[in-house]
Image (tube, rainbow, N blue to C red):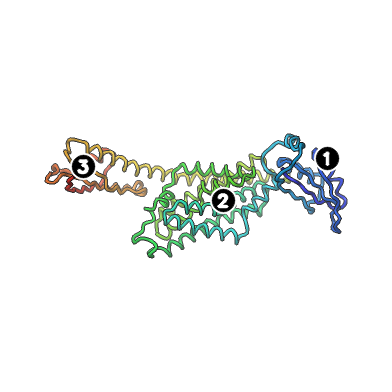
Amino acid sequence: MRLVQVFVPKGDLELVLETADATGLDYAVSEETSRGEFEALVSIPVPPAAVEPLLAELRAAGFDEDSYTVVTAAETIVSSRTDQLIGQFSGTRISREELQTRAEDLAPAASTYFVLLVVSTVIATAGLLLDSAATIIGAMVVAPLMGPALAASVGVVVDDGELATRGVLFQVTGLLATVLTAALIGWLLRGTVLLPPGFDITTVPQIRERITPNFLALFLALGSGVAGVVSLVRNVGSVLVGVAIAVALVPPAATAGLGIAWGHSIVVVTAGTLVLVNMLSINLTALIVLWLSGYRPHRRASVEHVYGRVRSRIVVLVVAIVVLSMVLGGVTYGTYQTAAVEHDVGTELEAMSDDPVFGDLRFQEVAVEYELIDVYTGTEPAVTVLVERPPGEQEPAGFADTVRERLEDATGGDLTVTVELVDTRRSG
């Protein structure tokens, strides 16, 4: 429930009371005893779905918007009348005015926003370098990047140009600040005693997860965007924390910054694609869900203009997401190919160990060097095979070529194979 309190200027009391009567709402009038310009305070308890119609009726009746209309959330209302009110005004979304206020809170003062952003980036960068999932999750909770995306969409739908511009500006500058902060941290830490000698960021599991984004990441981003908007319009703020963790904007942006620090262009492209897909998907789903939820500018003359802006933005966002999804598709295909080669090699080596043709020889995969970029540059996979043999036993003639041919038949492509023979004696 909500409590709407209207500060009534002198001469407008009858107008406010007639509007409340016309909407079928109960009210209480308190006489204003101060020496100000108000003659009364009208308190109206309403369900959330009634706030927007009530304010629209007041506006249509000519109530002066220079006055004060305060909407507060009522923790508890003890009355048998509430069921009738709720039945009279069906709906679960908050009013346009409440939505606009909440959106403004999601794009806070610049100083607060960038302090939280830098802190979350430092935490995320440390978590990535330490391969600590818990630390990265902490950074996701602190990160304020999702708020401006929702705020920008709300600004467009309710025709608040300042809010929309602020949301877009915060998104762009926030992403740049995150990438540059992570790049600076990486540059400062690279080659220090805090990281092992020859440290390669692409070998860290938490980083590797964000430089090999699957095409399914697009569906995760779209679903998270819908959940975020629904939690906003239905006043379920706790859901936003889970959405922030699910869509994860800061960690891939920080990964792109580390890619700059280490000079890995592939890391920058793949991680950058992931964070852009996430961000654009939130903007897209927010626009669509807000419009379908019935939010419109309070000025009817602006509805057509806003509809055109929403439609054009949706087209631009869809085109951008489709282009970026091609990168995701390429990464997904390349990742599948590298995994398929490694799987086929491992399966064939197990089969060769059980093949009587090779006697007591045992085959183990030591390494398969086949990266995502190799799929598209045509570089052959390099496989190192460790072969255990009993002491004194000799391998067949042309043994290395036989191993290579078997592995090439299994993978369906050319391989560079290195065979390492080790005399092994097993106890028991």
The relative height of residue 320 versus residue 262 in the rendered view (above or below) is: above
Would you say residue 265 is visible in this rendering?
Answer: yes
Give the residue pinned by disc 3.
362
Whether residue 11 sits left or right of residue 275 in the image: it is right
Instruction: Place residue 81 in its image quadrant.
Output: top right
Local packing at callout 3 (Cα closer than 10 Å; few below 14, some 14-19, many 20+) is: many
Local packing at callout 2 (Cα closer than 10 Å; few below 14, some 14-19, many 20+) is: many
| Disc 1 from disc 3: Cα separation | 89 Å
Residue 244 position within the rendered picture, expressed as x and y whole percent measured from the top left: 54, 49
Give the residue pinned by disc 1.
21
Amino acid found under the numbered disc labelled 2: Met
Q: Nearer the viewer, residue 23 or 318?
A: 23
Residue 120 position within the rendered picture, expressed as x and y whole percent measured from the top left: 52, 57
Mark closer to the observer (1, 3): 3
SS at mark 1 in the image = helix
User: Which label sits on residue 146?
Assistant: 2
Amino acid found under the numbered disc labelled 3: Arg
Q: Going 48% across and 56% down the picture, which residue do you hit?
A: 124
The quarter of the picture where the N terminus appears is top right
